Image (tube, rainbow, N blue to C red):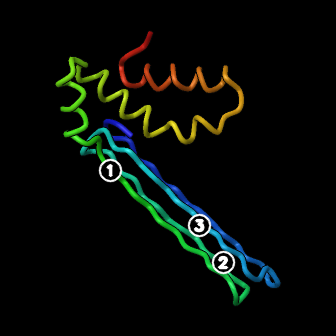
Amino acid sequence: MKDEARSVWQGNIHVYPGAQRTDAYQANRNLSLSHAARADSIPGLEIEADDVRCTHGAAISQVDKEEVFYLMARGIPYKVAEQLIVNGFFKPVLDRIPMDNVRARLEVSFAAKMGLAE
C-alpha cells in the first residue's frame, strides 16, 4: 500500500460438524510504503467440530530501511532498491501463478505503480 491507501481484509474459516482433525490457518500480510496507509484485518473462524486446530495471523510492515541502505551501498538507486524489496514481498504469490504472461503483466503493473514503468 502506498500514499493514503486503505485495505480491509476479511477472512473466514468454516469448519463444519464432522470435519474432525481439520488443521487450518489464515494469514494476511501487508507491506506499507507510507505512514499514511492503513490495513485492517478481520479474521473469522466458525468452528462446529471439536477436534480441530484453526489459527490466524495478520502483519503489516514497512520497507526495512537497512535493506534499502544495503542495496543503495551497492550502487542501486533508492527507487529501484525499494522496487526490488516490493518484488520480493510479492514473489511467493506471483510464483503461484502458472501463466507467465499474467505474472509478467502484474510485475509491469507493480513497477508502474512504484513510478518505475518501463
59 in relation to 47, above or below = above
- For label 3, the residue is 25
Q: Quadrant of the C terminus?
A: top left
| Image depth: mark 1 or mark 2 in front | 1
- Local crowd at mark 2 within 10 Å, few (<14), some, or many (≥20)? few
Badges 3 and 2: C-beta atoms under 8 Å apart? no
Residue 108 coordinates in the image, percent (x, y): 51, 19
- For label 2, the residue is 46
- For label 1, the residue is 61
- Local crowd at mark 1 within 10 Å, few (<14), some, or many (≥20)? few
Report the side of 95 relative to 89 (left or right). Answer: right
Which of marks 2 and 1 precedes in the sequence?
Answer: 2
Disc 2 element: strand
| Image depth: mark 3 or mark 2 in front | 3
Q: Residue at x 21, y 32 (%)?
A: 70
In the rendered structure, which amino acid carries the disc numbered 1? Ser
Q: Residue furthest bottom?
A: 50
Disc 1 element: strand
In the rendered structure, which amino acid carries the disc numbered 3? Tyr
Which of marks 3 and 1 precedes in the sequence?
Answer: 3
Q: CA distance from mark 1 to mark 2?
A: 28 Å
Report the side of 66 relative to 116 (left or right). Answer: left
Q: CA distance from mark 1 to mark 3?
A: 20 Å
Which of marks 2 and 3 precedes in the sequence?
Answer: 3
Residue 82 coordinates in the image, percent (x, y): 31, 29
Residue 28 coordinates in the image, percent (x, y): 49, 56
Q: Residue at x 70, y 90 (%)?
A: 50
55 in relation to 77, above or below = below
Disc 3 element: strand
14 in relation to 41, above or below = below
Viewer-proximal residue among 16 and 76: 76
